[in-house]
Image (tube, rainbow, N blue to C red):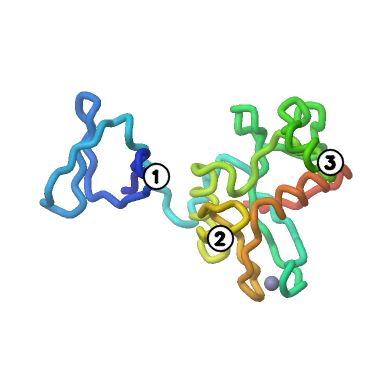
């Protein structure tokens, strides 16, 4: 099972994790040395089997022209409200609710989009992990120079180019503003 060491922000694979009195006793191999962590310093990542169809969110399939090879590729993402509820943002789009948690600061810097209060792939580690488990060939953790961090990205099916967060977030903002429906994966 996997856990995240919050202090180092590293994900590690454990052989066993036993939680007792606020501490986590972790071994990395069978009969291996036991390491002690404060429970608060780790996040146990729930095991999700590949192709587990129980994602708690709707998976949207955004058809998009790849910026590099200009061929059409599919981008998988969740679109959920960024208000702590993680509820699906669904068509017909509730712009009023989306504007409640608008990133006004970003919008003033870049008025080309509304910066609706929504999360897409690359925004939430837990949801990213679930999405990645479902589409392991299409989504991989890659380094983004623009953001200076590693996060899951869709890769172009033709040329493998990374389809970064801003590209997707921007596109979704436009579709919502224009009241256009985004296809989703029927599972
Ligand atoms: Zn491409």
Q: Residue at x 15, y 53 (%)?
A: 30
**70 displayed left or right of 23:** right
Q: Residue at x 24, y 25 (%)?
A: 22
Using the image, tell me which numbered label, if any, was put on residue 9: 1
- Give the label, 2 or 1, closer to the camera: 1
In the displayed structure, would residue 126 be above or below residue 66? above
Q: Ligand 1 lies in which image quarter?
A: bottom right
Q: Secondary structure at mark 1?
A: loop
The x and y percentages for residue 40 are 32, 29
Q: Secondary structure at mark 2?
A: strand
**54 displayed left or right of 82:** left
Using the image, tell me which numbered label, if any, was put on residue 139: 2
Pointer 2 or 3: first along the chain:
3
Using the image, tell me which numbered label, if any, was put on residue 178: none
In the displayed structure, would residue 160 be above or below residue 113? below
Q: Residue at x 53, y 59 (%)?
A: 143
10 Å crowding of disc 1: few (<14), some (14-19), many (20+): few
**27 displayed left or right of 10:** left
């Amino acid at each position: 099972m996997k856990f995240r060491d919050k202090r180092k922000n590293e994900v590690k694979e454990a052989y066993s994790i036993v939680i007792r009195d606020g501490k986590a006793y972790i071994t990395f191999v069978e009969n291996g040395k036991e390491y002690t962590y404060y429970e608060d310093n780790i996040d146990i990542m729930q095991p999700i089997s590949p192709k587990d169809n129980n994602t708690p969110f709707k998976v949207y399939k955004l058809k998009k022209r790849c910026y590099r090879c200009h061929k059409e590729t599919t981008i998988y993402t969740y679109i959920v409200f960024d208000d702590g509820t993680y509820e699906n943002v669904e068509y017909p789009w509730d712009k009023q609710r989306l504007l409640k948690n608008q990133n006004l600061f970003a919008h003033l810097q870049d008025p080309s989009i509304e910066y609706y209060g929504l999360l897409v792939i690359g925004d939430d580690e837990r949801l990213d992990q679930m999405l990645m488990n479902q589409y392991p060939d299409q989504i991989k953790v890659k380094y983004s120079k623009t953001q200076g961090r590693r996060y899951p990205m869709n890769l172009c099916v033709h040329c493998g180019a990374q389809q970064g967060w801003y590209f997707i977030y921007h596109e979704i903002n436009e579709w919502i503003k224009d009241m256009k429906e985004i296809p989703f994966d029927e599972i």
